[in-house]
Amino acid sequence: MADAAVQAAAGIDVECIVEAGDWPPEDALHDICVRAVAAAAGHAEAAGRGTLTILFSDDAVIQALNARFRGKDKPTNVLSFPAPAAATMPGAPRHIGDIALAYETVAREAETERKPFEHHLTHLVVHGFLHLFGYDHETPEEAEEMENLERRILESLAIGDPYA
């Protein structure tokens, strides 16, 4: 299991749900996600307690989500769904949002880009997490800011530049 101090430092309770795909074991996924979220929260002014759900699925499910919520009828590697402020029950930790990942796309990209699967997955969790806090890459300026932040976060995890 992930080091409890890492998760506590992030202040974010990460729930991982493996729905489909040939993902590594759930404990390994949880460890990767907790480290990625803790690092991202520490660098992205995303401090605060809360909960986050990460769905590990396949291309078919992610394609359906992408079509429904973004109008793009194709699979993608990661989708982020920020939770509305009203989604949290009074007295409960706020729900930050949900991240969904597609196994086939993530694995294909890691292989094509000759990156360790775990490093690519960590990058995508960081990327999805940043989207939950309003970071985007729609304009060149936004992309530069987000990518530079991703580089710093990944460097803190001893992972090389994902855009090199």
Image (tube, grey):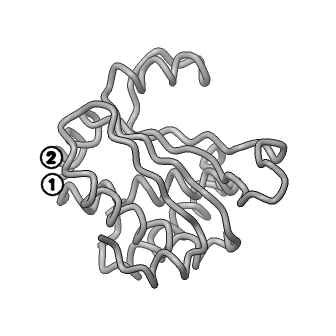
Residue at the extreme front? 91
Instruction: Count residues near mark 2 (Cα–Cα under 10 Å), then give few for <14, some for 14-19, many for 20+.
Output: few
State the CA–CA distance, disc 1 to disc 2.
Answer: 5 Å
Q: Would you identify the image quadrant in which residue 55 lies?
A: top left
Residue at the image position 32 percent from the left and 25 percent from the top:
59
Amino acid residing under circle 1: Arg
User: Is 101 above or below relative to 136?
Assistant: above
Residue 145 point in image, percent of width and height = 61, 64
Secondary structure found at label 1: loop
* Horizontal and vertical percent position of residue 151: 44, 71
Q: Looking at the rendering, in which quadrant would you find the C terminus?
A: bottom left
Viewer-proximal residue, 109 or 47? Answer: 47
- The residue shown at (81%, 59%) is 91
Q: Relative to 132, is 92 on the left or the right?
A: right
Identity of the amino acid at label 2?
Glu
Q: Is residue 92 left or right of residue 20?
A: right
Figure disc tally: 2
Q: Which mark is residue 114?
A: 1
Mark 2 — residue?
111
The spot of residue 125 in percent (x, y) is 43, 55
Residue at left offset 45%, top offset 80%: 6
Rendered position, 153 above or below 27: below
The residue drawn where x is 27% and y is 37% is 103
Query: Viewed as shown, does residue 50 lie left or right of 120?
Result: right
Residue 65, numbered circle = none
Q: How far across and down, in percent of the image, does residue 131 sit?
A: 61, 51
Disc 1 to disc 2: CB gap under 8 Å: yes
Q: Residues within 10 Å of mark 1 (few under 14, many from 20)?
A: few
Q: Nearer the viewer, residue 77 or 23?
A: 23
Is label 2 in a helix, a strand or a loop? helix
Which image quarter holds the N terminus?
A: bottom left
